[in-house]
Image (cartoon, rainbow, N blue to C red):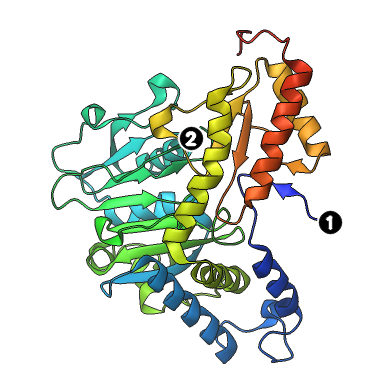
Amino acid sequence: MSDRIYNFSAGPAVLPEPVVKRAQQDVWNIAGSGIGILEHSHRGKVFERIIAEAEENCRHLAGIPGNYRVLFIQGSASLQFAMVPMNFLSPGRVADYLVTGVWAEKAVKEAKAIGTVHEAASGKAFKFTRIPNAAEIRYSPNPVYVHLTTNNTIYGTQWTAEPAVPKGVPLIADTSSDIFSRPIDVTRYGLIYAGAQKNLGPAGVALVIIRDDLIEAGSTGLPAILQYRAHAVERSLYNTAPTFGIYVMGEVFKWIRESGGLQAMARRNAEKAAILYDYLDDGTFYRGVAEAGSRSLMNVCFCAPTEQLDEQFANEAAKRGLSGLKGHRSAGGMRASIYNAFPKAGVEALVAFMKEFERAHRSAPATAARA
């Protein structure tokens, strides 16, 4: 019997079991070197091969063109909230942000500490339950870039396609919670970044995919470690790299390739999410949070009839080996994070528990007031 449970955590989140098992061995002795990955120098030949393979597999999966650099940078996505405006938001310019949740708001806050920000759209008025439509987006006259968050973990919403942006303006995206969950046209973006801890690996490292012209356009007045050019010139080895995080990301890239690539990930993720959304749509006991046209395939957010039942649901689910279902403290309810590595069987187990919980509590008033 397995001693593993179903991990619905929003991040750090579930990793592919083959990757975890491989890492167990490689922490002890990687590539027959007699040294574990945690102990290898970032300047040594073993790690040079690891990071080169990680980049090659990343490029293959996403079809990344030659005029884009692939960088592995410490600080996860939160550092990118600041690095992006520090590099590109010069005095006298304006950056446009599409605000679709808490993490987009955090990105805006960091950018405002650097320069002038225009919120081209915001979902705050409708509590971030959907993605703004095209008619609701109002760009500034000449933005230096447009920034969006592709998937919103707290509210369970996701952009289904990139929004149109002014001609010649680079689109910059925080893809932390849906990176490589589906095919992506890298050429639609000037810069893509993602914290690893949801779909790519452990916390603490970010994947950055950036076009060459943006590297050259970045500020030269920053400390080197905050300039994309420094990381590009040194091929992510400007400083002591987060070697274990990069190693795990590389193994995840291999796992995705071996599993059929991004098209296969998209099919699997749609199938898993449909199991849960179909159950929510067919019933009246639970309420899905996100509007149908904006639903995330990564984070499914829902509520029971009362806040007290939400709490009871999360506690009882945890006792059944369904961990991490309590919603974010700012949103409440429940949140099932079903990233690439999350198994279909776990979604089926959740739905079975939801049915059992509903049978036991269906007499609760479906219209009970919620905070």
**Looking at the image, do the residues carrying marks 2 and 1 touch, with CB atoms under 8 Å apart?**
no
**Residue under the point 24% across and 68% down:** 216
Residue 63 got which mark? Answer: none
**Residue under the point 27% across and 58% down:** 190
* Mark pair 2, 1: CA separation: 34 Å
Q: Is residue 334 above or below residue 246?
A: above
Q: Can the viewer see residue 181 in this picture?
A: no
Q: Residue 303 appears at what percent x and percent y?
A: 61, 23
Q: Nearer the viewer, residue 267 or 164?
A: 267
Q: Is residue 259 above or below residue 41?
A: above
Q: Quadrant of residue 336?
A: top right
**Residue under the point 13% across and 38% down:** 141
Q: SS of the residue at dot 2? A: helix
Q: Residue 51 appears at what percent x and percent y?
A: 51, 79
Q: Is residue 58 above or below residue 188?
A: below
Q: Is residue 102 above or below residue 39?
A: above
Q: Quadrant of residue 9?
A: top right
Tell me the mark number nearer the camera, choosing from 2 and 1.
Answer: 1
Q: Which residue is mark 1?
A: 3
- Amino acid on which the number 2 mark rests in the picture: Val
Q: Which residue is mark 2?
A: 102
Q: Residues within 10 Å of mark 1 (few under 14, many from 20)?
A: few
Residue 103 shown left or right of residue 147 in the figure:
right
Question: In the displayed image of the protein, which residue is found farthest to the right?
Answer: 1
Residue 32 shown left or right of residue 2 in the figure:
left
